[in-house]
Image: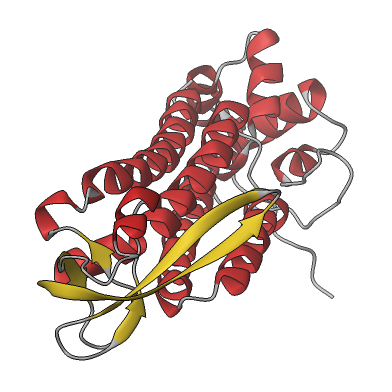
Amino acid sequence: MSEQKRPSADELLEALNVKAIRALRRAGFGLPRLREMARGKDGDDRVHAIVSEFTTDDAERMVETTWPPDRVPRRADRTPLTRRVVRRWSLVLLFDIAAAALCWLLTLAGSRQSTLAALVALLMLHGVWVMRAMPDSPGRKVAGFLAWIGLPVLLLGVVHGSPRAYLDIWGREGTASAYSLTWTRSNGVASPTCYVRLPDGQVKELRTDSRTCKSLDTAAAEPIQVVYDPSEGVLPVSGTKANLGIGQDVGFAMGGLLLVVLAAGTAVLRTALAARG
């Protein structure tokens, strides 16, 4: 079996992780100096010897990506650190966007149990699988903290605002008449649930506040303005599209997504700056 080819000095320097870079810098060998040495006579041998002396007994081990550090040995990845960070954070962004899309669909389907189960599963998957294999890079802890906050904010904003956002885009405005009202008691507190007959003849539960709902509990109750879904997928909401109030929900969700983007940008920028020495 042929021996594995040793990486060149430039390849080794590109693949060093942040711990190795810091160790070399403390010893007086920053990346610019090492790159200059690599261009000299016997540069590859000298650079490999310095990296081996001031980092570990085996220079190639310094490019391994493990999490938690030094607990899960993996095959060395000689891909430049900046590229590995970009690749991993791109995966995080794609995962978070896909998670938001899934929560949107489950919320519109009307299954609260499925939505809650998916929300918990996605948050666990994000923490255990997506964030676990992050390369050891500058700013990793700060970026990870921002991402941990950003995803729950994004998903909660999507779950809370999906029905109203859907109605704002695809819903119709109309006038509904009172149909019936029921009361449910929880922890000694009674709350009303009202049903209305929509312009197309459907009878649906109305999403509204308790005061509006109570006002429909009379035979002489006046018709109420609603925004409804002709395809019967989303429950109607009292009022008009102008007062659906989706701006707050959209802003909440976009704030969560912005935190994740900020986390990715922080990690990539700090890694790129460290790689320049």
The residue lying furthest to the front in this view is 219
- Residue 243 point in image, percent of width and height: 15, 50
The percent position of residue 57, horizontal first and vertical second, equals 88, 33
Q: Is residue 230 above or below residue 258?
A: below
When the figure is inspected, residue 106 is found, relative to residue 76, above or below; the finding is below
Say if residue 171 shows up in the picture.
no
Residue beneath the point at 39% across and 34% down: 262
The answer, for residue 110, to whether it is visible in the render is yes
Looking at the image, residue 30 lies above or below residue 261: above
Between 132 and 233, the one lying in front of the other is: 233
Q: How many marks?
A: 0
State the colouring used for the structure image.
secondary structure
The foreground one among 23 and 101 is 101
Residue 251: quadrant of the picture: top left
* Residue 181 percent coordinates (x, y): 42, 70
Q: Residue at x 35, y 51 (%)?
A: 209
**Quadrant that contains the N terminus:** bottom right
The percent position of residue 89, horizontal first and vertical second, equals 49, 49
Q: Nearer the viewer, residue 164 or 123?
A: 164
- Asked where in the image residue 240 lies, by quadrant, the reply is bottom left
Locate residue 49 relative to residue 249 in the image: left or right. Answer: right
User: Residue 138 is drawn in which quadrant?
Assistant: top right
Residue shown at 63% from the left, 71% from the top: 113
Which is more toward the observer, 225 or 133?
225
